Image: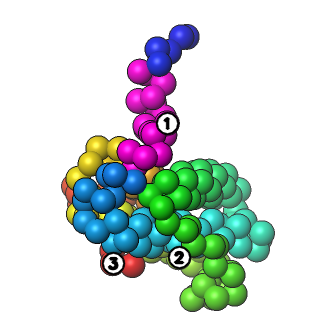
Amino acid sequence: MRLTRREALVAGGGALVVPGALAATAAADQSGQTVIASVSAALTLELTAVEAYDFFLASGVLTGRTRAPLRRCRDQDLAHVHRLRVTIERLGGIPPHAPDPSTIPSLTDATSESAALDFATALEEQTIGAYMATLRLIFRRPLVRIVGSVMASDAQQLVVLRQLAGTPPVPSPFEQGSPP
């Protein structure tokens, strides 16, 4: 199967955006610093999710039924981390660092598979809420495309986590997330 250059760019979610275009985009939306701070908050939640998934995968609380899906969620969140770091740098900001797992509230309290799924679900809901807040600040296509595609991926992860937890996968027609 051969892809045209346009199809490859669309499939990549516009990851090959010119760096200067993103900086101009941030300035044209809300204040550039406000946009950078909002994307950084979402990145911090993605970094927290990666640390949480690593903790759960190493802790031995997951069964075979949940291990592979949570590993996929972790791998996708790691890709989100890379994409958001590049975006923040292109906007002229400095990306945040991953939190120390011992400083993540309630992480070590999740000592069962059910608790791990509840923790991951709540964290993904907060991440989606952070993306919703960011989308309210931006209006330019390159940045909307990046934030929207990462948020959509997290919403898909949220459905998987809810299914694994035995809760309704899509409790309402429009996912809003929760406040971070």
Which of the numbered marks, if any, corresponds to residue 16? 1
Question: Which residue was labeled with disc 2?
Answer: 119
Which of the numbered marks, if any, corresponds to residue 1? none
Regarding residue 42, the answer to whether it shows in the image is no
Regarding residue 123, the answer to whether it shows in the image is yes
Residue 95 in the figure: left or right of residue 40: right
**Residue type, label 2:** Phe
Report the magenta residues as a range.
Answer: 6-22
**Marked residue nearer the N-terminal end (1 or 2):** 1
**Residue type, label 1:** Leu
Q: Helix, strand, or loop for circle 2?
A: helix
The residue at the point 44 percent across, 52 percent down is 150
The residue at the point 57 percent across, 78 percent down is 115
In x, y percent, where is residue 81? Answer: 57, 58
Question: Which residue was labeled with disc 3?
Answer: 179
Residue 134 in the figure: left or right of residue 110: left
**Residue type, label 3:** Pro
In front: 3, or 17?
17
Label 3 close to label 1 by CB (< 8 Å): no
In front: 3, or 110?
3
